[in-house]
Image (cartoon, rainbow, N blue to C red):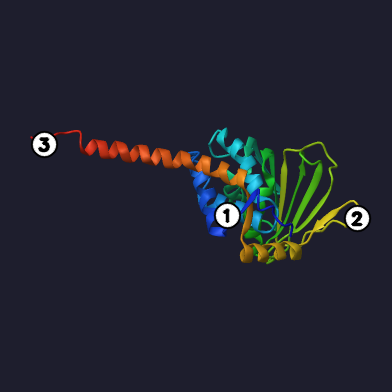
Amino acid sequence: MKKANPKTHIQVSHNELTSLCAKAFMGLNKHCGEADIIAKMVADLEMVGLNGVKHFVNALAFIEKDHDQPISIDSECLQGVKADLKGCSIICHLPSLLDYSVEKLAEQTAITLILTHCHNRWLAFSELLKLAKQDLFVKASWNNGSTAQQVIYILDAGQCLPELYLSDQKENDTHSLTIEISQHPLSHPAVHDNMQHISALHQADNQKNAWKQGIAVTQDDWAYLHSIASHLLVESSERSRMGAGGDHTEKHQ
């Protein structure tokens, strides 16, 4: 596990991280998305060494501009479901879309969820873990435009952490996410020289260290999350002052 620079990083606990992330999301005053679920999405990814906080900081810009309405299904058939997120982050909408997709497995053995025009796909991590806990097999894939990488994420039923495969980007589509959910095993890619394999065991080691030593977060990211969360505190204070003022506007005769 890479050591953080103590001059630019601070160590925080899992509880501190989830609490601040939840407050930061609530500070945006959005109707779609649940703060505790989103905070868990961030923390779970960060704990295994996959930069959950950085991805959340990037996601906040998309969430702030989100049209803040439930996502509608564009098309569906026996094999799959397709939805256009219209440039939104996945984190406010993925849980409900996965629930909808899993319900359809009562009628079939596998389904594919395709999300187009979406962002912050790394943060799907913890929601996909939930599917494995339901004894389902999961395979997620996307092209990461910022690093020109193709990411393949595979979870076998009951598995606690995924196998991750990163290779050179093969397609031009950098804003889609494909999630295959099955009651039967899904194939793993053949590992080759130009592919990076981040094993479940490696992630588990990072997770163990994070529980023992705390989570290293950059001071800039921590300060930014506090600034977003402060919107909630300011509004609460203003409501409190208005409430208190209302109690004293009438003078007793």
Q: Which mark is residue 252?
A: 3
Q: Nearer the viewer, residue 245 or 86?
A: 245
Residue pictured at 66% horizontal, 62% vertical = 132
Quarter where residue 154 is shown: bottom right
Find out whether the residues at labels 1 and 3 contact each other: C-beta distance under 8 Å: no
Task: Give me the C-alpha separation between circle 1 and circle 3.
Answer: 50 Å
Give the left or right position of residue 151, taking residue 135 as reference: right
Query: Does any portion of residue 134 appear in the rendered image?
Result: no
Q: Residues within 10 Å of mark 3 (few under 14, many from 20)?
A: few
Residue situated furthest right in the rendering: 193
Q: Looking at the rendering, in which quadrant would you find the C terminus?
A: top left
Task: Give me the C-alpha separation between circle 1 and circle 2.
Answer: 33 Å
Residue pictured at 43% horizontal, 42% vertical = 233
Give amino acid for label 3.
His
* Dot 1 or dot 3, earlier in sequence: 1
Give amino acid for label 2.
His
Q: At numbered mark 2, what does the secondary structure look like: helix, strand or loop?
A: loop
Quarter where residue 61 is shown: top right
* Dot 1 or dot 2, earlier in sequence: 1
Q: Residues within 10 Å of mark 1 (few under 14, many from 20)?
A: many
The residue indicated by pointer 1 is 40
The residue indicated by pointer 2 is 192
